[in-house]
Amino acid sequence: MPRSTRHIERHLIARIGWLRAAVLGANDGLVSTASLIVGVAAAAARPADVLVAGVAGLVAGAMSMAAGEYVSVSSQADTEAADLARETAELRDDPDAEHEELVGIYVRRGLDAQTARSVAAQLMRKDALGAHARDELGVSEATTARPIQAAIASAGSFAVGAVTPLLVVILIPAGLLVPAVVLISTAGLASLGFVGALAGGARPWRATLRVTFWGLVAMGVTAGVGRLVGVAV
């Protein structure tokens, strides 16, 4: 079988829409919930109060992530739609100028003028708006904004990340709660960094160290504040 009929490329950029939201959500769920639990526990709260705080943090955080991601990505989608509408009007009113615009883009990318003119003409005959969206605006199927997908991925991954420290509260005795949450959450952060880097094609150890370090900083600061508040109260 010729190699050309067997060769199928799967580029990682196609994952960027859901991968960013999922990794961010899971990391935020784990860090924020673990930090909240550590902070409340450090303030000498009862285990039941720590659990209530953790569950409230999970629900509030997941809803906040979903709403924030939806609003943010919707703004991107609105901008893309406005640019595409403008491009549609320009193609209708002055197609020759739009053709020359594509020619200039291809020449700057390295094609000679004659080839660039031919390529631009062929692409515009097939899908003029698609050609301008991709090559002029940088909007493609792989990177286009999907608000609902991003919101669901963020909320779901936040909840998954937040469940880990909550299980520690349920299963670990109160005297060992803070070190257990820190230890298990750190392991979870390292795993998230590693898996996220592999899924995105990045260097796993650098991402793992980065995520773990900042998670520990967040938990340490929150524990310190909780201890101060507990002493003051």
Image (cartoon, rainbow, N blue to C red):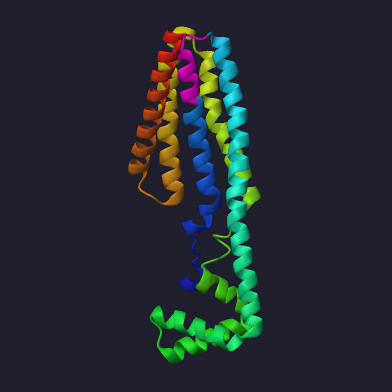
Residue numbers of the magenta segment = 34-45
Q: In which quarter of the image is residue 220?
A: top left
- What predominant SS class does the magenta segment belong to? helix
Where is 3 relative to 38, above or below? below
Q: Quadrant of residue 78?
A: bottom right
Q: Nearer the viewer, residue 109 or 67?
A: 67
Say left or right for 224 vs 171. Answer: left
Residue nearer the viewer, 108 or 186: 108
Above or below, 22 against 174 in this view is below
Residue 189 percent location from the top left of the image: 43, 33
> Is 126 colored magenta in this rendering?
no
**Residue 124 vs residue 97, the one in the foreground:** 97
Q: In this view, does 145 lie above or below 173?
A: below
Number of marks:
0
Residue closest to the far bottom: 114
Residue 226 seen by the camera: yes
* Location of residue 81 by image quarter: bottom right
Residue in the picture at 33% in, 43% down: 206
- Of residues 216 and 73, which is closer to you in this image? 73
Residue sitting at x 53%, y 14%: 171
Please say whether residue 36 is one of the residues in the magenta stretch: yes
Note whether residue 170 is visible: no
Counting from the top left corner in percent of width and height, residue 135 is at 51, 73
Above-or-below relation of 195 to 124? above
Q: In x, y percent, where is residue 136?
A: 51, 73
Picture coordinates of residue 39, whole percent (x, y): 46, 19
